[in-house]
Image (cartoon, helix red, strand yellow):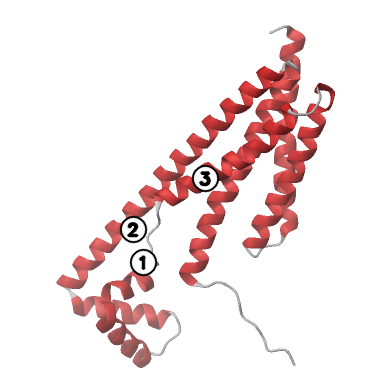
Amino acid sequence: MTEPTHDEAHGGALGERLNWLRAAVLGANDGIVSTAGLVVGVAGATDDRSALLTAGLAGLLAGSMSMAAGEYVSVSTQRDSEKAALAQEKRELREQPEAELEELTELLERRGLSRDVAQEAAVQLTERDALKAHARVELGIDPDRLTNPWHAAWASFLAFTAGALLPLLAMVLPPAEWRVTVTVVSVLAALALTGWSSARLGAAAPGRAMLRNVAGGALAMAVTYAAGSLLDVAGA
């Protein structure tokens, strides 16, 4: 008989994995969709390779820097909030330890422990590391593994760049008559893959995530290509 396995992630490991997954998937999807929309829109107005390359590179650089800066600011704010919460908890533990012990006991009771067991667990956790116990149980924070804004910024920057390179190369490398077709097909395939990957890594059903990615990318390219074509017809 095969021994049962139990390999799902728990606690901080799952939270950290999902944070990295969120930054990477958002960065890659934004890189693919925004750059594809940009180069396809320009392709609707002109078939000049240098114009397409210039537009694609500008979109790649601007988008990757924007994603990195936005992620850095967002995660820095989260880290500041975590530090402030930990500082307040440390002050409360110093000023009113008995009230904090009772609070920890009640929190453990709400998780299904009996009063006696919760009280004993709270005492042992407090004796071992009171701040860490309250941070994890009360605040949902691991003091040893606070969010890192630089990690998130670099993850978003690299993911956006990797995603943006696909539509850029698909647009400028093939012959003029095949550029839009190759770009659309490769972009939709890539979006289906990122949707599948994100769903599988997040332990979710892949079908809906793939459909959202593909539909959003197709809509973006259709709108920008139509806009570029109208500008070309108008002689703008």
User: Which is closer to the viewer, label 1 or label 2?
Assistant: 2
Identify the residue shown where x is 80% and y is 38%. Answer: 185
Residue labelled with disc 2: 82
Instruction: Give the CA distance from mark 1 to mark 2.
Output: 9 Å
Cα distance between the residues tagged 3 and 2: 21 Å
Report which residue position mark 3 lands on.
156
* Image quadrant in which you'd find residue 34: top right
Which marked residue is nearer to the observer: mark 3 or mark 2? 3
Which residue is more in the foreground, 215 or 148?
148
Position in image of residue 206 (x %, y %): 72, 58
Report the front residue among 116 and 155: 155
Q: Give the structural element (helix, strand or loop) at label 1.
A: helix
Q: Mark 1 points at which residue?
A: 139
Residues tagged 1 and 2 counted as in contact (Cβ below 8 A): yes
**How dense is the environment of label 2, judged by Cα within 10 Å: few (below 14), some, or many (20 and up)?**
many
- Labels 3 and 2: the sequence-earlier one: 2
What count of labels does the image hold? 3
